[in-house]
């Protein structure tokens, strides 16, 4: 059997490399992941898929307003929405903007004149709501102008329905208090000075970020159902970058030690294994990029761990080969016997890990545990690719190499090549394994 | 050839030396569960100065956040990291306490913040239980398949499972001690690490048992004990070398890799070392003990003499 894993495919890989990129997880580039849960609004008991689609659309629009490069917004289960914003600068602001309902209401406070900013709105009548706005933007009030505060304000314009309702109300309630509430909490209380129709401004005590956040919510409408934040995960950009750097260093050192160990201990076959390990690294990385696998810190750990495991197959084969050589087989025969007799062990070992990876993948489908999927996928990829490279690549390499060794040197008994294949300098002149202990203990 | 089986009681003793304190710690202190399972918030801050965990704690309680635990890392070039564990906090509470920290310490960088609601925590716990149960069932199936050609397959299976439990107990027991001493927590990654270790351990044992089976068929040893001993010595280089390559890479990760997965790497490191040890020194030694016990029982029952190989 001759299985060719040619270099040509790698060149092809490199050819399409331009569109393929390495996807780094939140823990490597920083950012925030938010798990939102939709709850049924008052008067309803279930969340429909239409609700979730609407929520996803609105949340997507809000997210886009932040200008994050690769946001991920996906529904999970029947009532959860997972939002991932890699590389975002202000995770807190994003969390507030995305998660809150964004329901803006103008409230008639004539019945409750003592209401103040921060109070919850209970059953006071609503004059108009945010859905009657055509536009909203952040502005800056001019000190000294009427009704102007100091700092950012929100400028808005009503549509015709809103303008009519607002005009009618303010026209008949001059001198009475009016409240503006966001998500049922008063953010501004004012006294109506005169009739207002088409536009106005909200001059609560906002920071510029808060004003921006409210404007984003007003622009894209309020959510049809309230969302609550179930879990969040945020990683600062410096920690992420630090992790990447450290992981690379660890990977290089780990790889270096494994290569050194294989070369020193198994010599010629070990060197071949190190070369196969190189191709393993390239292949695995290509798979990560093609799939694509989102690389997380745990995922990189899985990859580095699989470097150690990748040579497991080679160790099994070479130990078997040595035994065959010691028993007097020629180089070619020992090579073939080593590879074929080690196969069941290698197959079983890989199968065991593959099954565990599948279990882990299932386990990792939960939010808090999603980092585990990265580990499971990279370990799985590593195991499968390493089986191919350690078994088939190194076999092809070794066969080719042996073809160049003169035939008279193939019998290892007394051959000068013994050292190269990791055997003792002289053939063992002991009885077969085990006899001595057996005699000693008999 | 080295006589490993003759020293089997020493091997059992070494295992007991590690496992017994772990079990005692488990009974007294239990495990320190992380927010993945309990729900809550975990915040990591970097300060440009050295700090006292009690001071950080008082900032939190001044902001109205109780039940806070603060762990600090070893100061590094004048800066120090604090890991704060608190009940579930919302973004406003986090911002409030952060301004208070900045007021007290000047520059404070939030390196990470994780919040897990109680419902998600319960779900993760449920998933972890299912994953462990599924892994256990699959491993039993795998063992019965791997040993299908062995005489007394259930005996090999039992010994492999005991070796596996040995490794789990080593890791979980040590983690209970580490939880008490260093504040290490059991999180979702811990469960992942243990399951990965279990996979390694089972496989290691299967390789050794496979060689015993081969040698029993060849009748390579004078009796069962020597056959097992020879099989062990023959597979020793393989067992040690494959584990060593993995342990080297893990050691590199532990020393030089990212800080946030150190616990996970440590689980793998301890577990795989234990897995190698138990498959070499415990699983096979148990087979020998079992066989000897069987022989004695049979000798008492009827006239002895039969060699109890396969």
Image: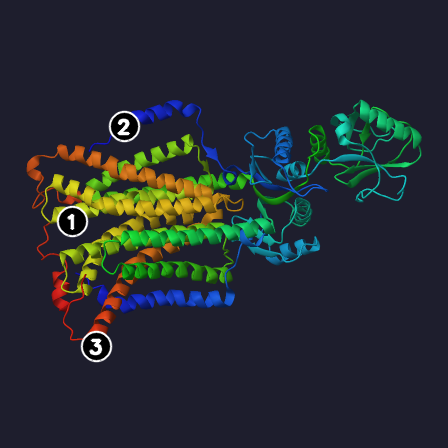
Chain of residue at mark 3: B
Q: Does the rendering let one see residue B82?
A: no
Q: Callout 3: few (<14), some (14-19), or many (20+) C-alpha neighbours within 10 Å?
A: few
Q: Is residue A22 above or below residue B177?
A: above
Which is nearer the eye, A368 or A148? A368
**N-terminal-most mark, 1 or 2:** 2
Circle 2 sits in a helix, a strand or a loop, which is it?
Answer: loop
**Quadrant in which the N terminus of chain A appears:** top left
At x 39%, y 65%, the residue is B19
Please give the residue where the numbered disc 3 appears in the rendered image.
Answer: B300
Residue B162 rendering spot, x and y as whole percentages: 34, 62
Q: Quadrant of residue A177?
A: top right
Circle 3 sits in a helix, a strand or a loop, which is it?
Answer: helix
Q: Does the rendering let one see residue B159?
A: yes
Please give the residue where the numbered disc 1 appears in the rendered image.
Answer: A323
The reply to the same-chain question for discs 2 and 3 is no
Q: Quadrant of residue B107?
A: top right
Which is nearer the eye, B287 or A201? B287
Real-space Cα distance between discs 2 and 3? 65 Å
Query: Residue A6 shows which numbered tag?
Result: 2
Circle 1 sits in a helix, a strand or a loop, which is it?
Answer: helix
Chain of residue at mark 2: A
């Amino acid at each position: 059997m001759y299985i060719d894993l040619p270099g040509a495919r790698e060149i092809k890989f490199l050819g399409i490399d331009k569109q393929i990129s390495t996807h780094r997880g939140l823990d490597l580039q920083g950012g925030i992941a938010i798990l939102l849960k939709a709850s049924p609004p008052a008067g309803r008991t279930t969340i429909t898929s239409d609700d979730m689609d609407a929520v996803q659309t609105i949340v997507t629009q809000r997210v886009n307003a932040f200008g994050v490069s690769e946001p991920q917004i996906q529904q999970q289960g029947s009532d959860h929405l997972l939002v991932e914003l890699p590389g975002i600068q202000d995770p807190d602001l994003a969390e507030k903007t995305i998660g809150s309902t964004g329901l803006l209401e103008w409230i008639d406070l004539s019945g409750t004149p003592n209401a103040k900013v921060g109070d919850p709105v209970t059953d006071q009548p609503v004059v108009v709501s945010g859905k009657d706005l055509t536009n909203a933007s952040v502005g800056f009030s001019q000190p000294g102008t009427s009704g102007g505060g100091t700092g950012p304000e929100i400028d808005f314009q009503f549509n015709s329905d809103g303008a009519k309702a607002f005009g009618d109300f303010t026209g008949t309630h001059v001198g009475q208090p009016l409240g503006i509430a966001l998500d049922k909490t008063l953010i501004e209380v004012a006294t109506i000075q005169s009739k207002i129709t088409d536009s106005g401004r909200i001059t609560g005590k906002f920071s510029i970020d808060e004003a921006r956040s409210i404007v984003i919510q007003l622009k894209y409408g309020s959510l049809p159902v309230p969302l609550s934040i179930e879990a969040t995960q945020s990683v600062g950009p410096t920690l992420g970058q630090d992790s990447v750097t450290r992981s690379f260093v660890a990977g290089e050192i780990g790889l270096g030690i494994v290569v050194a160990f294989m070369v020193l201990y198994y010599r010629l076959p070990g060197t071949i294994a190190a070369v196969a390990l190189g191709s393993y690294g390239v292949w695995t990385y290509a798979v990560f990029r093609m799939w694509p696998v989102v690389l997380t810190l745990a995922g990189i750990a899985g990859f580095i761990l699989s470097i150690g495991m990748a040579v497991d197959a080679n160790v099994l084969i070479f130990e078997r080969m040595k035994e065959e050589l010691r028993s007097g087989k020629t180089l070619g025969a020992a090579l073939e016997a080593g590879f074929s007799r080690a196969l069941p062990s290698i197959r079983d070992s890989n199968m065991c890990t593959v099954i565990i990876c599948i279990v882990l993948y299932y386990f990792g489908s939960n939010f808090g545990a999603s980092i585990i999927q990265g580990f499971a996928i990279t370990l799985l990829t590593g195991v499968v690719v390493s089986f191919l490279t350690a078994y088939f690549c190194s076999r092809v390499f070794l066969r080719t190499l042996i073809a160049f060794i003169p035939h008279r040197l193939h019998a290892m008994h007394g051959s000068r090549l013994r050292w190269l294949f990791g055997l003792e300098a002289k053939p063992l002149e002991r009885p077969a394994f085990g006899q001595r202990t057996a005699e000693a203990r008999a | 050839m080295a006589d490993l089986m003759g020293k089997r009681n020493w091997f059992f003793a070494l295992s007991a030396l590690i496992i017994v304190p772990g079990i005692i710690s488990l009974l007294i202190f239990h495990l320190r569960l992380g927010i993945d399972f309990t729900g809550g918030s975990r915040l990591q801050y970097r300060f440009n100065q050295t700090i006292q965990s009690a001071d950080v704690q008082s900032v939190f309680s001044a902001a109205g956040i109780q039940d806070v635990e603060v762990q600090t890392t070893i100061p590094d070039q004048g800066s120090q990291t604090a890991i704060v564990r608190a009940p579930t906090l919302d973004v406003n509470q986090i911002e409030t306490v952060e301004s208070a920290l900045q007021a007290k310490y000047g520059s404070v960088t939030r390196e990470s913040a994780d919040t897990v609601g109680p419902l998600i925590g319960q779900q993760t716990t449920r998933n972890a239980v299912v994953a462990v149960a599924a892994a256990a069932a699959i491993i039993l199936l795998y063992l019965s398949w791997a040993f299908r050609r062995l005489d007394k397959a259930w005996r090999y299976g039992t010994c492999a499972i005991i070796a596996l439990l040995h490794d789990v107990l080593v890791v979980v027991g040590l983690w209970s001690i580490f939880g008490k001493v260093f504040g290490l927590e059991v999180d979702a990654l811990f469960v992942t690490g243990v399951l990965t270790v279990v996979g390694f351990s089972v496989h290691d044992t299967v390789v050794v048992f496979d060689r015993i089976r081969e040698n029993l068929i060849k009748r390579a040893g004078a009796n069962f004990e020597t056959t097992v001993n020879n099989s062990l010595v023959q597979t020793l280089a393989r067992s040690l070398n494959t584990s060593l390559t993995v342990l080297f890479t893990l050691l590199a990760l532990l020393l030089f890799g990212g800080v946030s997965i150190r616990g996970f790497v440590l689980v793998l490191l301890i577990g795989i070392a234990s897995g190698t040890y138990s498959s070499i020194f415990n699983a096979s030694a148990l087979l020998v003990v079992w066989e000897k016990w069987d022989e004695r029982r049979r000798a008492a029952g009827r006239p002895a003499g039969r060699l109890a190989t396969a």
